[in-house]
Amino acid sequence: MATKKSVGDLKEADLKGKKVFVRVDLNVPLDDNFNITDDTRIRAAVPTIKYLMGHGSKVILSSHLGRPKGVTPKYSLKPLVPRLSELLGVEVKMANDCIGEEVEKMVAALPDGGVLLLENVRFYKEEEKNDPEFAKKLASLADLYVNDAFGTAHRAHASTEGVAKYLKPSVAGFLMQKELDYLVGAVANPKKPFAAIVGGSKVSTKIGVIESLLAKVDILILGGGMMFTFYKAQGYAVGSSLVEEDKLDLATSLLEKAKAKGVSLLLPTDVVVADKFAADATSKVVPASGIPDGWMGLDIGPDSIKTFSESLDTTQTIIWNGPMGVFEFEKFAAGTEAIAKKLAELSGKGVTTIIGGGDSVAAVEKAGLADKMSHISTGGGASLELLEGKQLPGVLALNDA
Ligand SMILES: Nc1ncnc2c1ncn2[C@@H]1O[C@H](COP(=O)(O)OP(=O)(O)O)[C@@H](O)[C@H]1O
Ligand SMILES: O=C(OP(=O)(O)O)[C@H](O)COP(=O)(O)O
């Protein structure tokens, strides 16, 4: 992917007094009372917005929230205004729509350095259809386009892709740039030795990532639910653990590929097994080759934690995608927590540690270690696609540097 022009490359004259359409990903979790339960994505959007405010731009913020079908009050962006205002230190104005006359009036009334938040762009079905007329209407509100919505960059929607056709320049925001620097840059040119840790529930959702990383890493550590498909492929009994029967051949071929490429592939040597899939299940540690009938593996065991930690001690760059066990249950969270702690410790020693979105981020946050890592991605699906080596439409649409 060619390097994209960044908001930091624009000159004072490009920004002062200009109306800037900024696509951000403010798709944050809200509880039943509309309280924000995790404001990471709002905080991550702040540097670009503050930069534009500081350069005298009129900032028009656009985002989606959830997956509404038409106008759905539950998915309004209004509950985000107080937190956004607090973080930006200004009173953010809120529009009741994202296009139309009312919105145009509000944009016209914005002072230099002012911020207007448009209502959920997915209230229009045209957004996800990437309808050109709708994209034109969004574009007509502004003079230039900044895309800082990394979490939605894998979607070719009107506000993430279409709008770039009608606004020049179209540039990347600071968050977008940081995500690409780590998830593309650091992975393509890592300080070596380079290790990848891949976990999560299924092999099928991670095949692309494993294959793509096999070409780059020195060490590949596999854990989580997917490990049992690899065990079974090697002839081990797996009890009632999660197995994808139709992926056994694929698991064998991935093991062979790793060997051929000289990648040190580590599978857990011991497993925490449970008598049922529940938080209060009876559990015990068994060797990988000794999973009893009727028991299911829900975490990696202490020997595996030790072996994985020792091999990570030798590395300079680590990327992690997918938990080591069912970390949502306290009893089976030890493996994931230990890996999170190890990465935090190694970050402190100068190792580059990258957490590739999704549940691994939730696990690191649960362990209170988020601020210790080199980079935590704000995108689940988007980071997965990047790690698979795919191009993101929201990035492709931007002007080259
Ligand atoms: N041994 C296991 N058996 C069943 N599910 C597991 C196991 N280990 C991890 N998981 C589950 O995998 C899920 C995360 O998988 P995935 O979505 O692939 O990860 P990520 O979101 O990080 O990419 C978690 O909900 C976790 O409980
Ligand atoms: O939360 C998001 O995706 P993620 O859960 O994969 O990180 C993004 O805001 C994209 O949302 P979408 O998957 O409804 O297009």
Image (cartoon, helix red, strand yellow):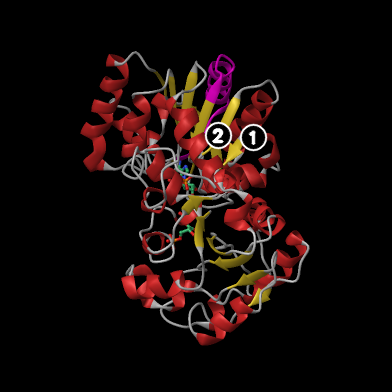
Q: Position of residue 148 (x, y in %)?
A: 53, 53
- Give the quarter of the figure containing the C terminus: top left
Above-or-below relation of 314 to 148: above
Q: In which quarter of the image is residue 215?
A: top left
Q: Nearer the viewer, residue 99 or 17?
A: 17
Q: Circle 1 sits in a helix, a strand or a loop, which is it?
A: loop
Of callouts 2 and 1, the N-terminal one: 2
Labels 2 and 1 touching (C-beta < 8 A): yes
Q: In this view, does 188 lie to the left or right of 77?
A: left
Name the residue tied to disc 2.
354
- The secondary structure type at the circle numbered 2 is strand
The CA span between labels 2 and 1 is 7 Å
- State the image coordinates of residue 330 (x, y, percent, origin top left): 62, 46
Residue 272 visible in the snapshot: no
* The stretch drawn in magenta includes residue 149: no
Q: Does 299 appear in magenta?
A: yes
Q: What stretch is highlighted in magenta?
A: 297-317
Q: What residue is drawn where x is 31% and y is 16%?
A: 261
Name the amino acid, label 2.
Answer: Ile
Please give the residue where the numbered disc 1 appears in the rendered image: 373
Please state the horizontal and vertical placement of residue 149, each as a whole percent of the image. 51, 55
**Residue 329 visible to the viewer:** yes
Is ligand 1 within 8 Å of the beta carbon of the residue shown at mark 1? no
Image x and y of residue 295, in percent: 43, 41
Q: Is residue 319 above or below residue 41?
A: above
Q: How many labels does the image show?
A: 2
